[in-house]
Amino acid sequence: MLKCNTLRLRFLLLDEYSLKSMIEGVERTFGSWNNSLRFYIGAFLGAGLAEKIKRTSSIMDEDVFYIMRRVYSENGWGNLEVITIDTIREVIEIYLKDSIEGSISNNGCHMTRGHIAGFLSTILNTSVSVEEVECISKGAPYCKFLIKIQNFRKG
């Protein structure tokens, strides 16, 4: 089992106000492009974290969500929970409770969605798409993401 503290990761911490200011600035500056930009920022960050983890540990597929849960909760991003792994529809459903991005944004968790996609795509070495279908920024009790993994293993 991977222990997060053995990775020797350094994190840049942003308070909620600074993150909110960044998101608002991106929205003002890039207008209709802001959601895409936030997604790609998140995807690059998620892929970078995954690359570091792959270089410094022997990760197993079943550890992936354990690592994500630890990173998200320990850094104040929210509490991630895997709800279902549907091998028939080839979809993984996760909830993110107390999402920092959802609590300060008014139009969804695009950076978080990108982070999940970039992290999983890099760790699993395959294409991953992530769709946010519910968000606390729009009144839901949690953010709900549906993850589709190319070459999803059955059973």
Image: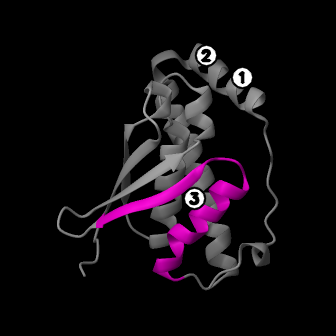
- Asked if the residue under mark 3 is in contact with the one under mark 2, i.e. CB atoms within 8 Å, the reply is no
Q: Mark 3 points at which residue?
A: 47
Question: What amino acid is labelled 1 in the image?
Answer: Ser
The image quarter in which residue 140 lies: top left
Return the residue nearer the eye: 68 or 143: 143
Instruction: State which tag comes first along the sequence, 1 or 3.
Output: 1
Q: What element carries label 1?
A: helix
| Residue that badge 1 annotates | 21
Q: In this view, does 121 lie above or below 99?
A: below
Asked if marks 1 and 3 touch (Cβ < 8 Å), the reply is: no
Write down the region rendered in magenta.
Answer: 60-85
Question: Which numbered disc covers residue 29?
Answer: 2
From mark 2 to mark 1, how far is it between C-alphas? 12 Å
Q: Which residue is drawn at 82% across and 60% down?
A: 10
Between circles 1 and 3, the one closer to the viewer is 1
Check if residue 78 falls in the magenta segment.
yes
Residue 33: x percent and y percent? Answer: 48, 24
C-alpha distance separating marks 1 and 3: 24 Å
Label 2's element? Answer: helix
Q: Are marks 2 and 1 in contact (CB under 8 Å)?
A: no
Other residues around mark 1 within 10 Å, as few (<14) / some (14–19) / many (≥20): few
Mark 2 nearby-residue class (10 Å; few <14, some 14–19, many ≥20): few
Q: Is 58 left or right of 74, judged from the image as shown?
A: left
Q: Which amino acid does label 3 sit on?
A: Ala
Q: Point out the tag, 2 or 3, that comes first from the N-terminus.
A: 2
